[in-house]
Amino acid sequence: MSIPKINNCDAAEYVDGLRLFNGANTFSENHIHLYIVYSYGYHFPMYIYDRNATMWFGNKDKYSVTTSKHQSQARPTQPVETWLDTNDMKLLVRQGSMVDFLFSKAKIVEAYRQEVVGS
């Protein structure tokens, strides 16, 4: 199955259907539990849908005028439940699910707590 090349003004329709697309400097990918929409490359995930959590995550950061336009064009019509910064969006992608993302964040907090308490 080939991934369709679309106009960015049609991206939201593809995003809502969790369908793969290639736009003008935008694209989407399926990972095991995640559907991810990018602007310009892997460095800026705009939206992530977690199929297990059945919720949308959005990138709250601003990158450029063009990326802001991409964010507007590709925004899902369903509510974006949680807004994360770019680093946390990339961590969510690396972890593969919101549950694993939260577990990873909890480990970071615990390590920090141990460092502070242990000092």
Image (spheres, grey):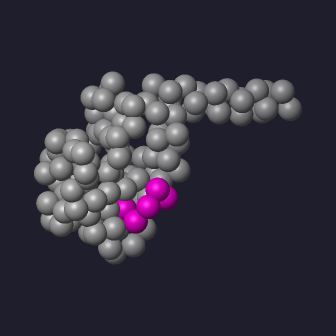
Question: Residue at 67% across / 26% down in the picture?
Answer: 110
Q: Going by the image, does 61 lie left or right of 53?
A: right
Question: Residue at 32% across / 73% down in the picture?
Answer: 66
Q: Position of residue 19 (x, y in %)?
A: 22, 45
Q: Position of residue 107 (x, y in %)?
A: 64, 27
Q: Going by the image, does 9 lie left or right of 24?
A: left
Q: Is residue 118 magenta?
A: no
- In-front residue for pair 22/83: 22
Position of the N terminus by quadrant: top left
Give the number of callouts.
0
- In this view, which residue lies farthest toward the front? 1
Q: Is residue 41 magenta?
A: yes
Q: Going by the image, does 45 lie left or right of 90?
A: left
Chief secondary structure of the magenta span?
A: loop
Q: Position of residue 33 (x, y in %)?
A: 37, 30
Q: Is residue 116 above or below residue 77?
A: above
Q: Which residues are magenta?
A: 39-43
Q: Position of residue 111 (x, y in %)?
A: 72, 30
Q: Is residue 73 above or below residue 17?
A: below
- In this view, which residue lies farthest toward the right? 119
Position of the C terminus by quadrant: top right
- In-front residue for pair 22/74: 22
- In this view, which residue lies farthest toward the bottom? 65
Q: Is residue 12 visible?
A: yes
In the figure, residue 9 lies in which quadrant? bottom left
Question: Residue at 45% across / 25% down in the picture?
Answer: 99
Q: Is residue 62 visible?
A: no
